[in-house]
Image (cartoon, rainbow, N blue to C red):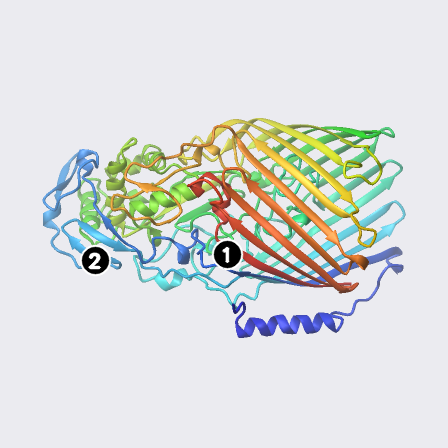
Amino acid sequence: MKICKMQYCGLVAASIAALSSGGVQAAGGAGSKFLGADFSYNGFIRLDAAFSTDDRVQQANQLGDLANGVPIRREPGNPVLGFAVPLQPTDALIGPAGVIPLSGIGVLPPTRGVSQQVGINDTITRYMPIKNQLLNYHLLRFEVTPTLSWGEFSLITRLRAVYDPDDLGYTDFDYRDYDDINGGVSGGESRQFHTTPDKLGYQVEGNKNPIFFERSGRNYMVDLPAFFVQWNSGNTTVRVGNQTIAWGQLLFFRIMDTANGLDLRRHLILNRALEEYADARASAPGIRVTTQITDALNVDFFAQQFIPTVINNVNTSYNVVPSQFTIHDRYDQGGYNKNVNYGIRFKGEFGNYNLQAMATHRYNPLGAIRWTKSDVNKALPNSNILGAAFNQYCNLVLGTGGQGCGPILANTPFEVAPGGVMSAEEWFNYAGYIKLDALDGLNKAVDDFDASQMLLAKNVGHNYDAAANELNAFFSAGEGLRGHIERQYFAENVFGLGGGFVTEAEPGSIFDQIIMNLETTYTPKRVFTSPDLGKDFDKREEIQVGFVAEKYQRFSTEFPATYMVFQYLWQKNSDLVGLLLDGYGSENYSRNGIKLDPHVPTSTTPKINPGIGAGANYVVFAALQPFPNYIYELSFATLIDVQGGVLFQPGVQWKPRGDLTVNVFYNLVHDNAWGNNPNKNVMHLLSQTNELAIRLGYQF
């Protein structure tokens, strides 16, 4: 299989040549003096790349939308009859003060993607092409960590610069190619919804650079993950400045690791698993105080600015939020950037045993999402019968002064724009994929917005046919609608207890020196995204229980010891990424027998959100085996969702010399290893990321 285009192969070859010849020359190593202080530094230059190895598309993105190129029959419903009955050409839109007969509109030519138009019914083929891509990820990365020390005081800095040469190898979607369709996309301040994918930028509503120690754009990011003054005196260490705090030590799981959110822009959770979340924790300015109270007991306190988890932007390789929706991040507008997280942990070591307890007051970095007004004043297109009829209804009955339904739509969660949802089948498929409720999500978009009801939208309960009729009526009238959602953040208290011990057995045996730890946390009132995206969110308790057993075992006198680890996590109400389990297990709806996702059951009476009542269960196995002289290391890590999903990551590290490292690892994702519905496990969100990842690094 050819895994790189000619220009990208050239970049890889040039990078290898540069690394092999010694890379960048550095000056001022350990032992140097600067400003009267001891000066030292270390750093690296690295090329990261990941190549897709299967044909599954990134279905959360425009070029991977499973409805692309699929003819889907639409039957709009009659709003006067609660959408339970299909709309006929002889019907009329009836409002409180008028009647708009559809027959008066006349015959209009089919709009883009529409064929086989018979009366009001039509067949829509989503007009974006469907494409998979060979190159998922490539970055050029530079990091340097200089340190200045004056006796008890130190200034510790870590500078990181990342560049994505995005003109090489990607298959990018560009919204500007569709600006001629109904005025293009208007809503949302973020550049990610208007042009090509924003690979590395992070902006929120009202602020293009919301993180003080970071500047980022479409294909670059420069930040200071560490920039703090450290004071050591006896048993006490104080750090003031930008920093990360790692209380947790588990692969994939974050039980007591509550201080910082994650930055998922670079490689989601698919980096080398044995590095834990070292590269993904989002630093924040604050203070940390650690002190050894007694020989056995220490205490660790922090207070930091709240910075949320940074999720992947739409239409990028690892995006999980469907790109038919515009996200409004309220981090800056809502004043959340002024909030502070704080917490304290006590940990004691008593021979072979340890105990710990912690309490954290924080804003949940994942946040919660709900429907929000689009604020886009754009009329329905007059190029189709329903759109023209609704615009007349808005002008004559609702009195919009010739603006059609634009002023009303601006106060609903929807926008007339290309790249939106175009059929009921597409709506149901993506609701199940992202663990939402397709029926109640529609009903909340009606009930929570008076403007939706002014446009004759109705709560259809759990009537599948009426829901499909209503969706198809508005998708036909709008020639596709983009949904608008907002992300907000909420305070919570997290309490944790943990304990562990080290086993003793015959020296050298497999049962000797196993390090075991049990960690539990309790959050009494956590705010979640409701599966219906309702305005009231969803608040409930969350409990996490995690167990880890790790061991170094020497199996041969010629080889260094093998590191092995087993982990287990149970969560009561949410999954690994923070979505409610209530939204799990949905099947897809189709009146015409269309299966957009061949792996998900589809019917005319599907199960919607049966949920997982026994909690989420995850298991991890991992191991690392160095070779003699540590030139080679073999590793593997496996994350298992017991509902039927598996992520398996084997890898090899090669160090031909001390300053040069080559890492190769493979991410194998299976979202239907057992069971019959991938919507029941979290791996379905990663199902398209079977990939070979390569790192070439030079350390100095």
Q: Element under label 1?
A: loop
> Is 8 left or right of 18, judged from the image as shown?
left
> Residue 317, which numbered label?
1
Picture quarter containing residue 700?
Answer: bottom right
Residue 205 visible to the viewer: no
Residue 676 horizontal side relative to residue 512, left or right: left
Of labels 1 and 2, earlier in sequence is 2
| Count of numbered tags | 2
Inspect this view and state whether residue 1 appears: yes
Residue that label 2 marks:
115
Q: What x and y, as percent, mark residue 94?
A: 15, 38
Residue closer to the observer: 189 or 137: 137
Q: Which mark is residue 200?
A: none
Q: Amino acid at mark 2?
A: Ser
Near-viewer residue (147 or 528): 528
The foreground one among 324 and 204 is: 324
Looking at the image, which residue is at 73% across and 52% down? 625
Residue 307 horizontal side relative to residue 126, left or right: right
Residue 105, percent from left and from top: 13, 51
Specify whether 274 is left or right of 434: right
Which quadrant would residue 665 be assigned to in this image? bottom right
Judge by depth and name the residue closer to the eye, 431 or 624.
Answer: 624
- Residue 104, given in percent of the width and then of the height, sits at 10, 49
Q: Residues within 10 Å of mark 1 (few under 14, many from 20)?
A: many
Name which quarter of the figure residue 457 lies in. top left
SS label for mark 2: strand
Residue 447 higher or lower than 699, as above or below: above
Q: Is residue 206 above or below residue 257?
A: below
Q: CA distance from mark 1 to mark 2?
A: 32 Å
Q: How many other residues sit within 10 Å of disc 2, few (<14), some (14-19) or many (≥20)? A: some
